Image: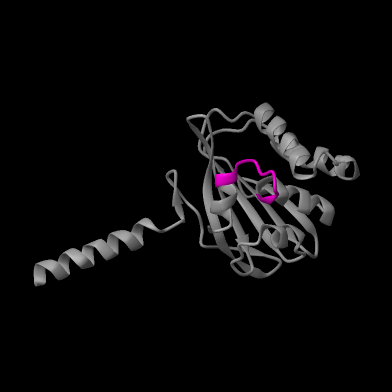
């Protein structure tokens, strides 16, 4: 009987450890982030891969857990997206090109209204990108999207429409990767 209980305890412990979404690709995502003096909780995290390469670990942070992508995109509440680069395959040029394509997909090709903000945002990728870099895109209702690289603020973009398109890259009906969208939504 003790042997059976030990096995069941071990199985339960293993199951509970393996369901932790905060450790991915060798990266531990913080359980919380602060934005606008609010504590945001990790809603979900996943790995962006292309072909056989894992490129980055992404984490979505919200006030409260939510799996409704449309509501998250439309929300005027504080939120954040954190990207940990885990591949040397990502270059400044590739990240800029992929992000521009993401904006086009997220907006159905209607980026004219936010073209200036998109160009401003893409400047965050102009310096060399190396494995281990961390980008944070934190929407603070009082300021806009605060863009940081390795904890150094790069810019602030105040447009709500831009924020919605930015988060739409990962959460829209045409996300960068369907599986990553599901992981970010905690599904």
Q: Which residues are magenta?
A: 171-179
Q: Residue 41: in sight, yes or no?
A: yes
**Residue 9 at x, y percent in the picture:** 22, 67
Q: Main secondary structure of the magenta part?
A: loop
Residue at the spot 34% in from the left edge and 59% down from the top edge: 17
In the image, farthest residue toward the right: 113
User: Is residue 178 located in the magenta-colored stretch of the structure?
Assistant: yes
| Residue drawn at (90%, 45%) of the image | 113
Coloring scheme of the render?
A: one colour
- Which quarter shows the N terminus? bottom left
Q: On the image, which quarter does residue 80 sit in? A: bottom right
- The quarter of the picture where residue 100 lies is top right
Taking the spot 60% from the left edge, 41% from the top edge, the residue there is 177
Residue 49's x, y, as percent?
A: 53, 36
Residue 75 is one of the magenta-drawn residues: no
**Residue 82, position in %: x, y?**
60, 50
138 displayed left or right of 48: right
Q: On the rendered structure, is 23 left or right of 143?
A: left
Q: Which residue is depicted at the point 73% across and 34% down?
A: 101
Q: Residue 18: where, in percent of width, then height?
A: 36, 56
Asked if residue 158 shows in the view, the reply is no
Check the image and name the residue furthest to the bottom: 1
Residue 89 lies, with reference to residue 172, above or below; the image says above
Answer with left or right where residue 98 lies relative to residue 143. left
Q: Nearer the viewer, residue 19 or 135?
A: 19
In the image shown, does 24 or 36 lie closer to the viewer? 24
> Vertically, is 4 above or below 127?
below
Report how many numbered discs are placed on residues in the image: 0
């Amino acid at each position: 009987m003790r042997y059976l209980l030990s096995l069941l305890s071990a199985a339960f412990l293993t199951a509970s450890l393996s369901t932790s979404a905060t450790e991915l690709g060798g990266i531990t995502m913080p359980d919380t982030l602060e934005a606008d003096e609010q504590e945001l909780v990790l809603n979900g995290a996943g790995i962006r891969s292309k072909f056989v390469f894992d490129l980055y670990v992404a984490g979505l942070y919200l006030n409260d857990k939510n799996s409704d992508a449309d509501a998250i995109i439309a929300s005027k509440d504080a939120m954040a997206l954190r990207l940990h680069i885990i591949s040397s395959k990502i270059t400044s040029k590739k990240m800029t090109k992929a992000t521009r394509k993401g904006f086009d997909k997220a907006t159905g090709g209607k980026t004219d209204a936010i073209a200036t903000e998109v160009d401003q945002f893409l400047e965050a990728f102009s310096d060399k990108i190396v494995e281990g870099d961390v980008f944070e895109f934190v929407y603070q209702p009082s300021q806009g999207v605060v863009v940081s690289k390795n904890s150094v603020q790069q810019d602030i973009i105040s447009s709500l429409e831009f924020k919605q398109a930015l988060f739409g890259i990962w959460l829209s009906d045409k996300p960068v990767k369907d599986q990553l969208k599901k992981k970010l939504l905690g599904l």
